[in-house]
Amino acid sequence: GVSGSQCQQSGSLLVSNMDRIGLSTDASSNLRLLLASQSPRRREILDMMGLAGRYTAEPSPLDEEKLQIELAEKKYSPHDYARTLAERKAHASAVDMDMPSDDEKVILIIGSDTIVDLDGNIMEKPKDESDAFDMITRLSGNWHQVHTGVAVYAVGGGRKVVDETKLLFSFTDTANVKFASLTEHDIRSYIASKEPMDKAGSYGIQGIGGQLVEKLEGDFFTVMGLPMHRFSRELSNAIGLLGI
């Protein structure tokens, strides 16, 4: 059982702080969330967390392709690459945003990026069906890593909390994934579904692509696009520190 003293401690997860986040339609709310992403999968995860109606989603204005080339030239590790992309996505949205007029109001901007890493080689979204076939063939029968970087910036709050924009936290969460040994027919049939075409590593674990996965070590949601548990803990801690 859980002792009384344990029950009295303040919660460390977002579920304990949900009431501090205002509805996205409530202009009087002091704390609002913005997801700097177009990803339907990340919106789905936020909704699953109970945040439906408590955030808005807008794609980041970041030139992602240009940054990917820059990071590749700097030879970032896949782990740092995912976190840096998440930070830059959130920062680009923060800089682009109008400051809240009220000193008490704070907007938290969530940036995230997911990459597939096979033996240290980064796999982004496929350029075409031939590229998708090549990626899935290389993943077939092997373990690979999926890194999801997450970053949260705060905008507003007057001088009490932040000067213009402030990085509250960023991290990379990693899961290990083992693909089954796939036949060429399996791979071509999966590509024909069109599901791989907008996904890092050319598969989506939460869709048809889940059939390709034999084993998983780590957070399923990290592979889907946003590590639910770690994000919940980090965001809850950040909200507590902001004292809103």
Image: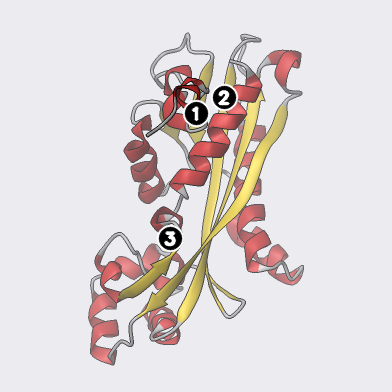
Q: Quadrant of residue 47?
A: top left
Label whose residue precedes the other's in the sequence (2 or 1): 1
Say which of marks 2 and 3 sits in front: 3
Residue 157 appears left or right of 147: right
* In the depicted structure, whether residue 58 falls above or below residue 211: above
Looking at the rendered structure, the kind of residue marked 1 is Leu
Write the residue at 32% across / 39% down: 48
What percent of the width, then of the height, locates residue 38?
43, 46
What percent of the width, then of the height, locates residue 132?
40, 78
Front residue (pair 121, 65): 121
* In the depicted structure, whether residue 47 falls above or below residue 201: above
- Disc 2 and disc 3: Cα gap in Å? 27 Å
Q: Quadrant of residue 188?
A: bottom left
Neighbourhood count class around disc 3 (C-alpha, 10 Å): few under 14, some 14–19, many 20 upward = many
Residue 212 appears left or right of 14: left
Q: Which residue is mark 3?
A: 223
Say which of marks 3 and 1 sits in front: 3
Say whether residue 36 is visible. Answer: no
Q: Secondary structure at mark 3?
A: helix
Find out whether the residues at labels 3 and 1 contact each other: C-beta distance under 8 Å.
no
Label whose residue precedes the other's in the sequence (3 or 1): 1
Front residue (pair 129, 8): 8
Residue 107's disc is 2
Q: Which residue is mark 1?
A: 33
Write the residue at 38% across / 83% down: 133
Looking at the rendered structure, the kind of residue marked 3 is Val
Q: Quadrant of residue 111?
A: top right
